[in-house]
Image: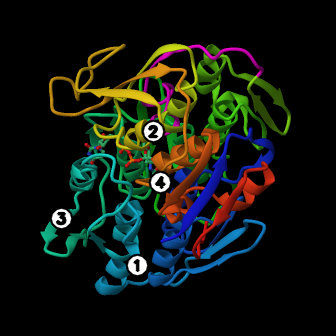
Amino acid sequence: MGQLVINGGKPLKGRVDLRGAKNLVTKAMVASLLADSTSVLKDVPHIRDVEVVSGLLSLHGVKVTHDEDGVMTMDTSAVKQARVVDIDAHAGSSRIPILFCGPLLHQLGEAFIPQLGGCQIGDRPIDFHLDVLRAFGATVEKQIDGIRLSAPNGLTGAKIELPYPSVGATEQVLLSATRAKGITELTGAAVEPEIIDLIAILQKMGAIISVDTDRVIRIEGVEKMQGYSHRALFDRNEAASWAAAALATGGDIFVGGAEQTKMTTFLNVFRKIGGAFEIEDDGIRFFHPGGELKPVVIETDVHPGFMTDWQQPLVVALSQAKGLSIVHETVYENRFGFTDALRKMGAEVQIYRECLGGHPCRFGRRNFYHSAVISGPSKLVGADIVVPDLRGGFSHVVAALAAEGKSTVSNIELISRGYEKFLDKLTALGADYQVREDVRA
Ligand code: EPU
């Protein structure tokens, strides 16, 4: 595993450019399976999660190309069943395989999902996904090495209500319902911009989908779909990460490709803390305008709330704000593991089981440390730390860049799951670091 040795205490200044959102691109790639012609997706980042999904598509007979400019083509004219051992060997680090089910059931009448990976930030069950697939008429059979699904007579539209507006389960419904027989009505749907962009892609492919008020999505099944051409939505999570990095290090970063309307909630919080931003046509400049940062109370939530993926680097910035900040994590039950390393570096962060600072959530009165209280400003000092997951890892690097002295950050390959050319971007921002072992980030 690779290590970064970071000499912190220098503001990050410069420009980074975003490509398409990891959390849209990977699903858009799966959507190509619904057609039997070629799809073209633009602005696809070169990140590990994309490599995994490309590999899985190839195993299923899809011809995938991905050039340096981020243009990906997927020719699905010869989709075939993949070998279970190959899927299993390949899928290790990703949760996307579960979304292959609907399209494969339509194309081949059966599908197999191996044990799923992804960041260790909670239990991450797949019960909603399996319930959705059963509602469409699939037979779900749990086996030792994974789950086998079949639908020899195809899938049929259904009335589905999600117990929680899960992003993945909503995508499962969309990818299964578009070619199912009849009408599907989904209530309790997630409506993240990445989902709306996926709906735009499906519409280009021939689907009939309406997004109504109050989290209701209606899908009228169609028999055939065709390939699409689409430029992926920018990565809002990456934009928020660099914005927080600018604030935490007292820096100034222009994030090319970031758009205001998809980030309103983040921008409001950024401003409340004392961060400044300037919206341009081609991106957003995020900077620390000088003076003291202010504490805030944040509750993570589904869209249009404050995204769970934004809180980790922002907690580092909050360690520099004067006073007590509270972050109540309501999406994942176990997403504060990364704060151990911040404490080691001198941040004052306490985590609690109680629902603090907001509404009681489904994790209250249970054994989940899902609220954090951050007391600042604290002087951060360099330390040896190990990246635990994608967003937590980014926040560790930000803390090391903000801290005085030398830090050694291990396991940084995990960051390349979601941040394209991460080390090049750090260089462009003037970060002082060396790579100690062979790292692909
Ligand atoms: N949940 C269930 N059962 C299910 C599915 C979800 O209980 O069958 C629960 C989860 O355990 C969680 C909540 O529902 O507590 C929300 O999970 P959701 O399904 O919305 O998350 P996801 O689709 O697995 C995507 C992103 C995450 C992002 C969340 C929330 C991808 C590949 N991942 O995950 O991104 O945090 O939505 O917006 O799209 C990341 O990028 O670092 C990341 C973790």
| Separation (CA) of disc 4 from disc 3 | 49 Å
- Give the label, 4 or 3, closer to the camera: 4
Q: Which residues are magenta?
A: 289-310
Residue at (52, 35) in percent of width and height: 310
* Residue type (three-letter) at the residue carrying disc 2: Leu
In the rendered structure, which disc, 2 or 1, sits on the residue that comes first in sequence? 1
Residue corresponding to mark 2? 342
Q: Position of residue 147 (x, y in %)?
A: 21, 69
Scheme of image coloration? rainbow
Residue farthest right in this picture: 281
Residue corresponding to mark 1? 90
- Give the label, 3 or 1, closer to the camera: 1
Residue corresponding to mark 4? 384
Q: Do callouts 4 and 3 mark residues in contact (Cβ within 8 Å)? A: no
Q: Residues within 10 Å of mark 3 (few under 14, many from 20)?
A: some
Is ligand 1 within 8 Å of the beta carbon of the residue shown at mark 3?
A: no
Residue corresponding to mark 3? 139
Quarter in which the C terminus is drawn: bottom right
* Residue type (three-letter) at the residue carrying disc 4: Asp
